[in-house]
Amino acid sequence: MTSTDTARPDGDVVELSTPADVVYVSTLRLAAASLAARCELTIDDIEDLRLAVDEACALLLPHATADSHLGARFHLHPGKLVVDASVTTSETSEPNRDGFAWTVLDALASTVDVHMQADTLTISVTKARESVQTL
């Protein structure tokens, strides 16, 4: 075991999986906030990211199959956190990009991408400190 107090999060990856149910979204929000602090994001950035993760999950959950898990993969970098939230789906549709949830998500995140691979729908949310966004 190594000390994480002095280690910079350059390329670390953390993965979480919960049942695909709205009651577990708070677990992913809390993890995002904690990991964003490790990435040295500002308090405002951390709050934006928490809300963005919530919106991404809200967009994903209607597409989840009954036995699906809500997965989150957190990619940590100095000044930046990328969250890949995903569910298993039997559909080929994508989240509604015309609705209020997408508008909020897009406003809160530095970048947002949607990926459909096989039977997995993923929304990738990146939050970066403003001074680091050009990396």
Image (cartoon, rainbow, N blue to C red):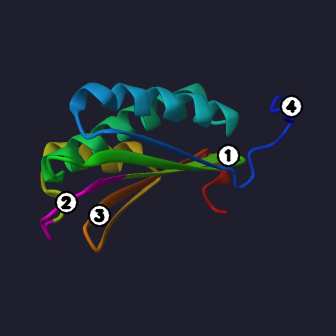
Seen in the picture, residue 23 relative to 93 is either above or below; the reply is above
Q: Disc 2 versus disc 4: distance between alpha carbons?
A: 39 Å
**Residue type pointed to by label 1:** Gly
| Residue 89 circle label | 2
| Residue 79 circle label | 1
**Residue type pointed to by label 2:** Thr
The residue under label 3 is 120
| Residue 3 circle label | 4
Q: Is residue 93 left or right of residue 127?
A: left
Residue 134 position within the rendered picture, expressed as x and y whole percent measured from the top left: 63, 62
Secondary structure at badge 1 equals: loop
Q: Disc 1 versus disc 3: distance between alpha carbons?
A: 28 Å
Q: Earlier in the sequence, mark 1 or mark 2?
A: 1
Q: Disc 1 versus disc 2: distance between alpha carbons?
A: 32 Å
Name the front one of labels 1 and 2: 2
Q: Disc 3 versus disc 4: distance between alpha carbons?
A: 35 Å
Residue 18 position within the rendered picture, expressed as x and y whole percent measured from the top left: 36, 37
Residue 73 position within the rendered picture, expressed as x and y whole percent measured from the top left: 50, 50
Taking the spot 64% from the left edge, 31% from the top edge, the residue there is 37
The N terminus: image quadrant: top right
Q: Are marks 2 and 3 in contact (CB under 8 Å)?
A: yes
